[in-house]
Amino acid sequence: MTEQLHLDDDSVTTFEATVERVLSDPPRVVLDRTHFYPTGGGQPHDTGTLRAADDDRAWRVIDVEKRDTVYHELGPVAGSEGDMPELPQSGTALRGEIDAERRAAHSRYHTAQHLLSALLLAEFDAATTGNQLYRDRARLDAAHDRFTDADLDRIETRLNELVADGRAVSSYTMDRETAEATLDTDRTRIDLLPDSIEELRIVEIAGADGTDEPYDRTACAGTHVGDTTEIGEAAV
């Protein structure tokens, strides 16, 4: 089972790994460890490059999927001449290089989505029912009949106030039983997670200065910024 390193530190964009398995149709590799984020939770997968440690071979990572483990689909490096190099064999040492701009964009939008979801729930009793992130935008679905123009102006103003506050964003693990007993189930929707998931990664956005209660706290395996000011100006 691939160790998903981004769950412990989602700021890292280069890492070393070893090939555990190779598949040919489509060309994919399974690594012992990875910082590449697989598609899930409304967040698209990372892209980047895998380079052989002992020669000049390199492959473009064009898709990352998690099933029984994490699969990295490979293609030729952009701008390279000729065919894609021979696939690495099991045991090959590789260096992973993640597209840092794409990762940063997804992290900004994902943290902004968490802020917006918490805001809508707190001020409009509107739970988030779906979301999708892209490199240049994000979509959020909320259980609310209709937001007026005045509502949207108010939401945008408040969202940007939260961004400008510079609230710290952190993550940690929590066992499911504790999470179900202590977290706001309207926000976390732990009931939607498979019963097989017994340990959750919790992403927390700090509350206002001087308060111990976080502004938002929810189960999430996605990547995030370290401080809300990294999101930049938000438009609703």
Image (cartoon, rainbow, N blue to C red):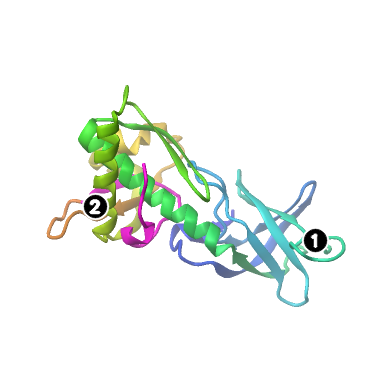
| For residue 93, side relative to residue 173 (left or right) | right
User: Which of 119 and 172 lies nearest the eye of the viewer?
Assistant: 119
Q: Where residue 111 sits: x, y (%)?
A: 38, 51
Q: Quick check: can you spot residue 219?
A: no
Q: Residue at x 29, y 30 (%)?
A: 126
Residue 112: x, y in percent?
37, 49
Residue carrying label 1: 87
Residue plotted at (36% across, 41% down): 236
Foreground: 39 or 183?
39
Left or right: 157 in relation to 30: left
The magenta-colored residue range is 214-236
Q: Decide: few, some or many residues near mark 1? Use Cα within 10 Å; few <14, some 14-19, many ≥20.
A: some
> Looking at the picture, does residue 173 appear above or below residue 50?
above
Q: CA gap, disc 2 to disc 1?
A: 49 Å
Rendering coords of residue 220 (x, y %): 40, 47
Secondary structure at numbered mark 1: loop
- Is 233 magenta? The answer is yes
Per the image, the residue denoted by label 2 is 161
Residues tagged 2 and 1 counted as in contact (Cβ below 8 A): no
Decide if residue 212 is on the left or right side of residue 102: left
Query: At 78% across and 63% down in the image, what residue appears?
Result: 89
On residue 116, the disc is none
On whether residue 1 falls in the magenta region, the answer is: no
Q: How many marks?
A: 2
Q: Residue furthest right?
A: 82
Residue type highlighted by circle 2: Glu
Task: Look at the picture and state if 131 lies above or below 43.
Answer: above
Assign a secondary structure to mark 2. helix
* View extreme (left): residue: 210
Q: Nearer the viewer, mark 2 or mark 1?
A: 2
Who's the residue at 39% across and 59% down the image?
Answer: 225
Secondary structure character of the magenta stretch overall: loop
